[in-house]
Amino acid sequence: MAGQDVESRLRFAVLGPVRAWRDGSELDLGTPLQRSILGMLLLREGRAVTPTEMIDAVWGEEAPPRALGALRTYVSRLRTVLEPHRPARTRPDLLTSVGRGYALRLPPNSLDLTRFETGIAEAETARRAGKLSVAAECLRVALGLFEGEPLAGAVGPYAEHQRDRLVERRLNVIESLMDLDLELGNHAAVVSELIALTADHPLRERLRAQLMLAYYRCGRQGDALAVFTETREALIEELGIEPGPELAALHQRILAADPTLAVTPAATGAAAGAAAQAPEPEEEPAPELPRPAQLPAAVNDFTGRREIAGRLRTLLSAQSSAEGVPVAVICGIGGVGKTTLAVHVAHASGEVFPDGQLYVDLRGYADEATAPESALGAFLRALGIPPDVIPEVPAERSALYRSLLADRRILVLLDNARDAAQVSPLLPGSPGCAALVTSRVKLADLPSARLIDLDVMEPDEALSLFAAVAGPERVAAEHAAAMDVVAACGFLPLAVRIVAARLAARPSWTVGSLVSRLADEQRRLDELRVGDLAVEATFALGYGQLEAAQARAFRLLSLPTGPDISTGAAAAVLSLTARQAEDVLESLVDASLLEAPAPGRYRFHDLLKLFARRALEKSERPQARTMALRRLLDFYLASCQSAHRLAYEGSMISGNLAVAGSGRVFGTTDEAVAWLIAEGDSLFAAINQAATSSRAAEQLLPAGDLLVAMEPLLESGTHTREFDHGTRAVLAAAMKIGDQASELRARYVLGRVLFAGNRLPEAEEQFKIVHELSTARQEKIVTGEVLNALAVVVGRQRRHTEALAWFETASQWYRDNGVPAGEALVLSYSARDHLGLGHAKDAIAAAEKGLAIFTEIGSGAGTARARYHLGIVLSRVGRLTEAVHHHAECLEFFRASKQRVWEQRVCSRLAETFITAERYSDAVRHAEEALVVSREIGHPFGEALSLTVLGKALKGLGSATRSTDCLRQAFDIFTRLGAPEAGDLRLLLDGAQVVES
């Protein structure tokens, strides 16, 4: 029974990224390889898969030597994810072992692909029964299960093959749906969809034929013939073939104006039969009802929004559907242009609604919103009902209103709605009419409504609006300044219109002067007002509707300066549980006061953030603000401590961090590094904010600790510039207030950053100061690490004897403090300096001993680094096969854990080994991989190293010109960095007679 309970709570998806949920919460499925294995098991639908089949499916011909062990590890991790509460040593209920293989028992209807195929089968049954509308709806629901490219994120030959199969399956179903729509007479509605489909798949003749038929039935014979011409040209150009017989026959029938093309029995048969049996009605003159025309005037400078306006017109004009009344809800932040867009679309749709338009401002955010019964009364009067016969009971008013709209084609525009309860009584009840609603709230509970979440304008749209109001000549004269102005407005249409109107009313002002006025964030909202228009007043309407807990969260979340915030970080700021915080955050998203750019992440619009901070200063005491930011730092520090502990097993750093709160707890290094990368910008924003605001050591120290704890992120190479800026900011603050503890931490990380940039003398200077501070303060947090770092940086400058002395000091310190991982690290790094002195045996012994210690203590990260150094030594002494093995093993680890600096290093070393083995093609491949990574992460020393080995490999292939070009580029970079490798390359280039002595 327990197994059945677990199954009932699980859902899986392959029609998009490979994903899984339990009780609505998404599960962390791990690395792409692990997701690929799960994807294969899901697609096998409970059938057993042997390990050999899995390895071939996921790795193909490039399977690593220990693929079977890796496979078993991934299966074990998947079992833990799928059944986290399964007691140890009990058989799994879901991912079971079957013989020598594995099978995944899928709960009924838990896989989206199963539901997709079920929907197709139901559609076929309905079609055979003559229920074409039902069949079409079944196919639409089935196609709605796709969430992007099937098996996205999965890798390997099997995933590629299945992805192609599912994409083709989806296209076939779409074509079937188009056939049904054409049979139902929905040719006008499907034209735009078919245009998009044929643009994406220009060689699919069935889609082209459907578009030709749809055009023809819309009376656009010329367009239908043009589609055939385009298709024929494309087929000849791409495939060298003529159109197939079916497409050619349709072309001839259109040319001949075949009358059977213009009518379909499914669309007209029922109506024709009813007409034949109906008695001839007596002709009575229909009463003349008023034609309401209540729309506000459209703005004459409406700009942009072309794609959304087109979608809305298409949605509202879907008159042929008998499924219900089209209802579109435009939601978004105050000032984003909801009403302007709605009025523009309503005017543009006038021909579709010849019986008129109704409009009401529901005043959803005023002190007293318009009651539905009041709006109904106004509508009934506009439709010709005398006031004295309008019912008093709201339900009766609604019924009369819907009766009057029956068999008429009227558009109802409900502006500024508060909630679904206010809107529902005002919606038409019969096809032919449509409703367009605007609201700051996402009316997700409004039945059958299509939500359009209106974002701010694109930069070019905002600039066009600014020019339309302020004058195109003034904008053209100061184009760059104009772009700065609309950016300062956050591309919010209301803000752009206000500043443009102010500029238009002041001929003496320049666009540049506006930039200066908007630069001060403290006064920016004050600048965004003109006449009765004010951005702050618009925001205040939405803010005033919040409950106390929502308003507090809205204010406090404006404190962090990061680009966005995660649910966990927000919970820390608000002092709530993650579930409580998510509820509040989502309610603010529903109110269009926060945005949710990705699951679990939230952000403000720039101007809303300024408004929230102004409200914060009025409502929250300084101490409350300080404590909120401290809780955020504590959350980040605790989370980074967990990440550091996983990435550097045995390091003393994580145990010496001053952690005061709780944070994320990670299960794997991969998960930890992925979190660090995702949170990187927010982490550095918190550090810089602390450095700016701290007035005492106890305020600054968490930022210094955080820098050190983020060391795994530094290894990823994704945020090198941010580390440089953040460490210097903390260092400056520490020096200003005399905080040696924070100074020590900042200088250590700064030394790491300088070393990564090959600025070796500067790095050495920082490390020596850190060593002095650590000794003076007897602070152990980075003592061993800085001794090792000094040895490495000295060794890189080819002072090998001095480096070994530093290594011996570091090793002794680690032994004295009982840190075997530190001793192993020292042994691994020292191998290269032994080699530099010509002591090959000592180098091998040190590297092998370091690897043995890391293996014994079970340190994945340490083992990978030890293999890297051992591989270098073995390559230099000619043991090439062993070197390649060690480097291949550590490369897999570094890629999985997203440590891109190390990935680049290993690829370069593999290339060197293959050059020695005269396997130049393999060398070129790995050197190019190293070059790509180094450029992606902005690592100039790694780029120069990669170019060097690439040049040598190309020379081995006989590509002398490309080889010389690579070596020249590497020489220039090494010279700029002041690296000793420049001297080695000069000799090489001199030998090639490229560089003149």
Image (cartoon, rainbow, N blue to C red):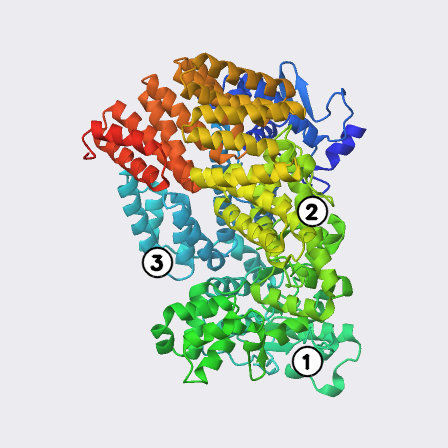
* Cα–Cα span, label 3 and label 2: 61 Å
Three-letter code for the amino acid on which mark 3 is drawn: Asp
Three-letter code for the amino acid on which mark 1 is drawn: Leu
Image height of 721 relative to 496, above or below = above
Could you say where residue 273 lies in the image, as x and y percent from the top left? 57, 58
Q: How many labels does the image show?
A: 3
Kindly state the secondary structure of the residue where label 1 is placed. helix
What residue is rendered at 42% in x and 75% in y? 511
* Cα–Cα span, label 3 and label 1: 43 Å
Kindly state the secondary structure of the residue where label 3 is placed. helix
Q: Is residue 652 visible?
A: yes
Front-lying residue, 229 or 58: 58
Could you say where residue 798 lies in the image, as x and y percent from the top left? 40, 28
Kindly state the secondary structure of the residue where label 2 is placed. helix
Q: Earlier in the sequence, mark 1 or mark 2?
A: 1
Image height of 560 relative to 829, above or below = below
Front-lying residue, 246 or 78: 78
* Cα–Cα span, label 1 and label 2: 58 Å
Image height of 649 relative to 400, above or below = above
Residue underneath mark 1 = 380
Residue underneath mark 2 = 635
